[in-house]
Image (spheres, grey):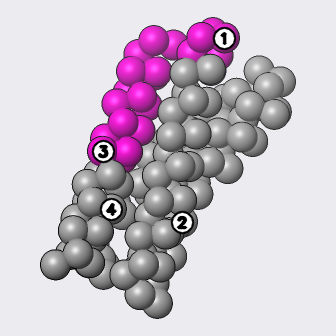
Amino acid sequence: MMKKNSPLRDKSYLFAIKIVQLARQVQNDKEFVLSRQIMRSATAVGALIREAEFAQSKLDFIHKMSISLKEANETAYWVHLLFDTKHITETKFTVLNNQCNELIAMLVSTIKTIKAKLKS
């Protein structure tokens, strides 16, 4: 369904790396709950994209990508919360928020494309 080296796969992995680094910083601020939540949702995005590579069908592929989309949306929530509670700078927020929104847009596009192929 998806090429081994795809922009979506690569970007989700690089985003996860940035979030793991951010989670370390947030843990140092003694915000263990927030750091675990954002790390769980952000790393799930890429993990689900990888799972989708071996989907058993197009419907299974859509399902996995849809869950990845939900995790990306949750990650956007945590990024906003960390910014609004002054745990990250505006610069870091802008970078992470833009990357997260880009992943969301790519996931939406991927899901729509596969759904359109199913209908034709």
Position of the C terminus by quadrant: bottom left
Q: Position of residue 59 (x, y in %)?
A: 42, 78
Label 3 – label 1 distance at C-alpha = 26 Å
- Indicate the secondary structure of the residue bearing disc 4: helix
Please tell me whether mark 4 or mark 3 is closer to you in this view.
Answer: 4
The residue sitting at 45% across, 84% down in the picture is 55
Which of the two discs, 2 and 4, labels the residue nearer the N terminus? 2
Please tell me whether mark 3 or mark 1 is closer to you in this view.
Answer: 3
Q: Name the residue under label 1.
A: 85
Q: Which amino acid does label 1 sit on?
A: Thr
Res 15 seen here? yes
Position of the N terminus by quadrant: bottom left
Circle 2 Cα neighbour tier, 10 Å, few/some/many (<14 / 14–19 / ≥20): some
The residue sitting at 36% across, 47% down in the picture is 103
Specify whether residue 99 is painted magenta.
yes
Rendered image quadrant of residue 90:
top left
Left or right, 95 with respect to 31, comes to left
Q: Position of residue 53 (x, y in %)?
A: 41, 80
Circle 1 Cα neighbour tier, 10 Å, few/some/many (<14 / 14–19 / ≥20): few
Q: Which residue lies furthest to the front in this view?
A: 119
Q: Which mark identifies residue 105?
A: 3
Res 21 seen here? no
Q: What stretch is highlighted in magenta?
A: 83-105
Q: Which amino acid does label 2 sit on?
A: Ala
Rendered image quadrant of residue 94:
top left
The residue sitting at 51% across, 33% down in the picture is 76
Q: Which amino acid does label 4 sit on?
A: Ile
Which of the two discs, 2 and 3, labels the residue nearer the N terminus? 2
- Indicate the secondary structure of the residue bearing disc 1: loop
Q: Mark 4 points at which residue?
A: 111
Q: Name the residue under label 2.
A: 47
Specify whether residue 97 is painted magenta.
yes
